[in-house]
Amino acid sequence: MIGIISKGIAWPTLGLALGTLAVAMVAQTPTAPPPTAHGAIKLIVKVKPVTQGTGLSRKRFFLIKGSLEANKSLIQSMEQRPVTSRDCYYRSIGASEALIAWLKQNDCESVYCREVNDWKDVEAVPEFQRALATGEKEFGSRDLARKWLPVNLPENIRIGFYKQQQRDLLAFIKQAEETSGAKVMAVMTDQKGNAYFTDIEPGTYVISNIIRTERSDAASLWNCEVTVKAGDISTVMNKPFQISNTRDMKASMLKQTKCFSDEKPLPACPAR
């Protein structure tokens, strides 16, 4: 077969054809996928009293592009924002002490935080009783009225505090994105205070809760600089970025903590 080909095709032409075929075969040979170009962060948030396996649950944290220095103006704005506690807000709109206690029981910013599924709660909270009575007239069922109870509460009680927090949060996020030129990422901690930022472009970032988190008698604000390197989520599982609002913890856990919050005392609520 080679002899037949050689009679009809000049050797230089045949050599060029074979060379081209070899290049094509090399190009089609499977190669190992390149290492991931993005990184990840496992965040752990510990709050006092610090215990193993527990942390700040159901709270949002954000990843802002750039260093602390690059975001200096933004961070100063966060730090200077007046603290309005949940209790003070609800007292300012005339909410009952029973409703305030119900919200505090599960660290809720609004009544949508958990379902009102206990009749004892309905009987204990005057606002719930009034909403239930309105719902019974509307739905014709006491059980259905309880299930849809929040919709018959006044808006300032239903979502007023949440809307106030969201307004300021969105303003800070807008400022952060204008400063850095990059979208702000968000995650929520689980029941153990763990959260994961994934698919992050390598670089320097600030982990922040942006709006202070109310805890007991103080409000915590985290702004923690972190460097992200390329690697998948498995590479960070054993190297979490742990932050806290206290140094009062075991030496081993203190050593693992990379950043501490700025604390502000909660203001006293005006008398009503």
Image (cartoon, rainbow, N blue to C red):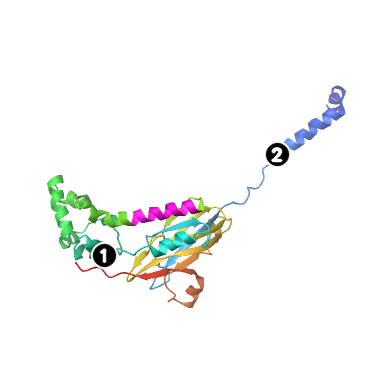
Q: Is residue 46 visible?
A: yes
In the image, what residue type sits under mark 1? Cys
Mark identifier at residue 139: none
Residue 100, x across and y down, in percent: 23, 64
Mark identifier at residue 27: 2
Would you say the magenta stretch is mainly helix, strand or loop?
helix
On the image, which quarter does residue 269 sit in? bottom left
Give the vertical position of 204 relative to 11 (above or below). Answer: below
Query: Callout 2: 10 Å neighbours few (<14), some, many (20+)?
Result: few
230 horizontally vs 217: left or right:
right
Query: Callout 1: 10 Å neighbours few (<14), some, many (20+)?
Result: some
In the image, what residue type sits under mark 2? Ala
Q: Which residues are magenta?
A: 165-179
Q: How many marks?
A: 2
Find disc 1 in the rendering and name its residue: 88
Which quadrant would the N terminus be assigned to in this image?
top right
On the image, which quarter does residue 122 sit in? bottom left
Give the vertical position of 252 relative to 59 (above or below). Answer: below
Residue at 48% from the left image edge and 73% from the top image edge: 253
Farthest residue, direction top: 8
161 horizontally vs 53: left or right:
left
Q: Specify which label sits upstream in the sequence, 1 or 2.
A: 2
132 horizontally vs 4: left or right:
left
**64 falls in the magenta region:** no
Residue 85, x across and y down, in percent: 30, 65
SS at mark 2 in the image: helix
**Contact (Cβ within 8 Å) of mark 1 with mark 2:** no
Residue 91, x across and y down, in percent: 22, 63
Residue closer to the observer: 245 or 172: 172
